[in-house]
Image: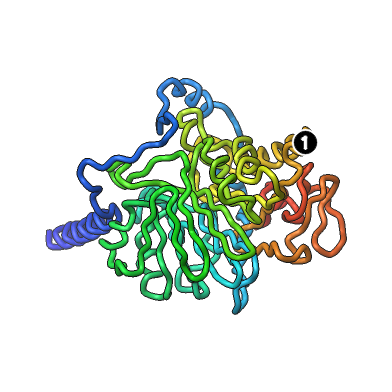
Amino acid sequence: MAAALAAAGAAAAVLAGELRHVRGEIGAPARRGVRFRNTEPSASFAPEGLWRSLQELRRDGGPRTPARSIPVIVPDVGAVAGECAATWLGHATVLLEIEGRRVLTDPVLRYRCSPSRWLGPRRLHRPPVTAAGLPPVDAVVISHDHYDHLERATMVRLARTQDCTFIVPTGVAAHLRQWGVDDGRIVELGWGASAVVAGLTFTSCEVRHFSGRGLRRDGTQWAGWSVTGARRRVFFGGDSGYTSAFRTAGDAHGPFDLTVLPIGAYSTLWPDIHMTPEEAVSACGDLNPAGRTTLLPVHWATFDLAPHAWSDPIDRLCAAVGRAAGNGRGGGIAVAVPPPGRRVDLASTADGTGMLDGTGMSDGTGTADGAGACDGATPVAEAHRWWSDDRITD
């Protein structure tokens, strides 16, 4: 009996601890009466797409998780930030280097994107780095408050270990303040507003999505971000469905040296709030109507959040870029597809990340590897299709 009571007490303590953790992860309550909306009519769930989505789930569209380990590289970013570079750390987390400054986007470095430590989507690959292992960061940019883009544990760690400014959409600052981040370190911007941090101009750009933690919906805004310096421009799309607002942002702030856009977690159940890879190519063209750009696809290969094969987004993206180049609409788009943790240096074509020229792939040393080509794309891209099952090694 004593043993049973002790076990029950231990279980109750663990459960109580988990409930406290969940309450903390939910964040601050939204301001009463405040509700943000997309400019274009949008639904986060489309009931008319339910039957088609059920069919998607029943079809064998490929594995939802990789058969073997996704290659992960410990980042080698150097002591000094570069002119224009990016290190994809998984999902929408990217370490950007712009004119000697470092900007971290949507940092999620735990193993689950969930308010729970035990339940919820688990990473398909380990984080390339922990929050404690990051180099000095000048700014942290948040696109919205969903759990796969805003994680309390990582944000608290960054606030304690980094001398950085947190740049967030309207309403999201309340979460950070509740987690102990000093209000003087937070810059909160609505669509169209700008602020200069560490010598870079951050502009909140309209995208098409929604927000919410727990059962609270749309009480905070969602945004993409234009980050510009004197010479370099980067667009971070965060999470969005296709929208005409991309053309507006491109006209106002583009073209961009680097365009970071989500390509995964799409479904006919939610066509308005997540782009397909084909729509991401169109969005990239809208953002860069009169210039060349490097497209870094994110929001794929890290969490299983939709009924498609885990590598389907990048295969479809490569095909879409090739088609766009063939019909004259996408010839200015280069595609960088580094494995998690690999740094892509846009200021150098000899950075070892490889190049795509539409006919074959260079590994940065002059040797060709056509198996990795995304037909029609131009520099920069990985030297092989590391996401293909036959290329992934244990």
Q: Nearer the viewer, residue 292 or 195?
A: 195
Q: Nearer the viewer, residue 241 or 123?
A: 241
Q: Is residue 299 above or below residue 275?
A: below
Horizontally, is 167 left or right of 291 in the view? left
Query: From the image, which quarter does the C terminus lie in?
Result: bottom right
Rendered location of residue 158, percent (x, y): 41, 69
Circle 1 residue? 328
Q: Look at label 1 and name its amino acid.
A: Gly
Q: Is residue 102 above or below residue 302?
A: below
Residue 111 appears anywhere in the view = no
Query: From the image, which quarter does the N terminus lie in?
Result: bottom left
Asked which quadrant contains residue 344, the reply is: bottom right
Say what secondary structure mark 1 lies in.
Answer: loop
Horizontally, is 122 left or right of 370 in the view? left
Q: In the image, what residue occupies the spot 71% across and 40% down?
A: 321
Count residues near mark 1 (Cα–Cα under 10 Å), then give few for <14, some for 14-19, many for 20+: few
Rendered location of residue 132, percent (x, y): 45, 73
Residue 358 appears anywhere in the view = yes
Rendered location of residue 45, percent (x, y): 40, 30
Horizontally, is 369 left or right of 333 in the view? right
